[in-house]
């Protein structure tokens, strides 16, 4: 019988995620079964799914979006076949049906389930995203996001626009692996263990571990820019995709409301810092995120009502990222953001943003926005924690 994540429950009422099934690897070796070739592979994602979104973030950061095509399914689960009641990821009939999603023009699939059954007629697992698809062999290469991002990081460097960017550098690999382990268990998967729990005891256990881990992140980020030091790594991207969804979805829908993300000064501004890494903001579609969670889990939200909130903050942040400005703090006709310049804030007019951005060597994400009174619109972030200047871009050499 076709299954989804909502079916992954233990006898104790705890959510237990099952492993991914397709685990082949793309290699830079031209003689491998799946060699790294421009134009050969396609990444199927959902903008709503954090696991798929981290793959898409890698695609953008590494500059692979011209070599590897991608497309998104609809935000809200739908019937995947007329012959049973399974609900899952489906494609729209047109580009306008659900903006951001598009029909499957490679295989004519109506759902992600169709792709799995095309790749394996005997498949009996979940029909999940991401799906890394081989156009040549018409099969799924891999559906495990942790492995896909490692492939994107190294195996396509001969054709990547940003080949020098290494989010898993050798000297940090042991530290990244250690951080990944506890963040996955307590935060990435932890929010799901909170939200999908069907009994009080497993929820209590999961939410306790979640906030212990968030407290640990806050402490780490009070001392350094990123989880593993002063360089952006895989660990940060893996954490970011959960954090960007936290206040808008997990705090409400998954009952993770003991403390909001914006109540953690360092984590909150760290999230904004990563959002402004070139390419990352384009992977965040908050409309898809909210529509999916609130509209696809009737056992949690039976009427599918999507709460308001968060749109203005994300719009301001996206505007800043688009312009290459370090922080957005206002929205009015003449003022679209604050740019960190040394130890002072400068209010920028629209025409001066790009010139000013080129002049500034670095910015401080711990003090992102806040000279109140510089704009009649109140800034959405007001934090003064650490006034050091940061190197930009934040990648290892």
Image (spheres, rainbow, N blue to C red):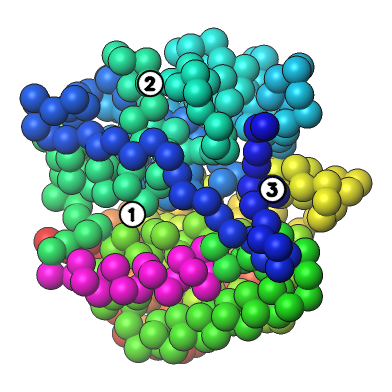
Q: Who comes first in sequence, dot 3 or dot 1?
A: 3
The Cα–Cα distance between marks 1 and 2, rounded to whole angstroms, is: 47 Å
Which residue has dot 2 on it?
Answer: 139
Residue bounds of the magenta highlight: 171-188
| Residue drawn at x 33%, y 22% as measured from the top left | 134
Viewer-proximal residue among 350 and 396? 396
The Cα–Cα distance between marks 2 and 3, rounded to whole angstroms, is: 26 Å
Identify the image quadrant of residue 1.
Answer: top right
Q: Residues within 10 Å of mark 3 (few under 14, many from 20)?
A: few
Q: How many labels does the image show?
A: 3
Q: Quadrant of the C terminus?
A: bottom left
Residue 226 in the figure: left or right of residue 71: left
Label 2 secondary element: strand
Label 1 secondary element: helix
Q: Can the viewer see residue 375?
A: no
Which residue has dot 1 on it?
Answer: 355
Q: Looking at this rendering, what residue extends furthest in the right direction?
A: 303
Residue 308 in the figure: left or right of residue 367: right
Viewer-proximal residue among 281 and 44? 44
Viewer-proximal residue among 326 and 221? 221
171 in relation to 48, above or below? below
Residue 154, position as x, y percentages in the image: 18, 45
Q: Who comes first in sequence, dot 2 or dot 3?
A: 3
Q: Residue 7: give its label.
A: 3
Residue 345, position as x, y percentages in the image: 45, 76
Most common SS among magenta residues: helix
Give the label, 1 or 2, closer to the camera. Answer: 2
| Residue drawn at x 69%, y 24% as measured from the top left | 80
Residue 133, position as x, y percentages in the image: 38, 25
Q: Can the viewer see residue 84?
A: yes
| Residue drawn at x 54%, y 63% as measured from the top left | 189
């Amino acid at each position: 019988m076709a299954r989804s994540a909502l079916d992954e429950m233990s006898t104790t009422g705890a959510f237990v995620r099952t492993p991914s099934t397709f685990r082949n690897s793309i290699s830079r070796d031209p003689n491998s079964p799946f060699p790294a070739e421009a134009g050969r592979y396609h990444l199927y994602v959902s903008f709503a799914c954090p696991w798929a979104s981290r793959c898409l973030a890698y695609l953008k950061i590494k500059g692979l979006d011209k070599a590897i095509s991608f497309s998104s399914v609809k935000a809200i689960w739908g019937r995947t076949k007329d012959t049973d009641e399974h609900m899952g990821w489906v494609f729209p009939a047109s580009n306008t049906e659900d903006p951001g999603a598009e029909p499957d023009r490679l295989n004519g699939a109506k759902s992600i389930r169709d792709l799995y059954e095309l790749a394996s007629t005997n498949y009996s697992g979940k029909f999940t995203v991401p799906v890394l698809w081989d156009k040549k062999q018409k099969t799924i290469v891999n559906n495990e996001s942790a492995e896909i991002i490692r492939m994107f990081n190294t195996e396509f460097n001969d054709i990547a626009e940003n080949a020098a960017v290494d989010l898993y550098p050798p000297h940090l690999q042991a530290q990244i692996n250690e951080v990944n382990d506890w963040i996955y268990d307590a935060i990435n998967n932890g929010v799901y263990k909170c939200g999908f729990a069907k009994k009080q005891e497993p929820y209590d256990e999961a939410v306790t571990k979640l906030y212990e881990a968030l407290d640990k992140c806050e402490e780490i980020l009070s001392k350094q820019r990123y989880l593993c030091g002063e360089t952006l790594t895989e660990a940060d991207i893996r954490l970011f995709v959960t954090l960007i969804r936290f206040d808008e979805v997990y705090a409400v829908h998954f009952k993770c409301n003991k403390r909001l993300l914006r109540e953690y000064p360092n984590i909150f501004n760290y999230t904004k810092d990563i959002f402004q890494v070139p390419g990352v903001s384009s992977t965040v579609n908050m409309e898809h995120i909210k529509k999916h969670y609130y509209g696809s889990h009737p056992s949690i939200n039976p009427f599918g009502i999507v709460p308001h909130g968060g749109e203005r903050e994300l719009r301001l942040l996206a505007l800043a990222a688009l312009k290459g400005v370090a922080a957005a703090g206002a929205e009015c006709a003449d003022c679209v953001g604050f740019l960190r310049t040394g130890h002072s804030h400068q209010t920028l007019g629209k025409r001066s943003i790009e010139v000013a951005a080129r002049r500034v060597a670095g910015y401080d994400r711990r003090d992102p926005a806040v000279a109140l009174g510089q704009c009649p619109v109140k800034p959405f972030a007001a934090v003064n924690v650490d006034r050091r200047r940061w190197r930009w871009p934040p990648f290892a050499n």
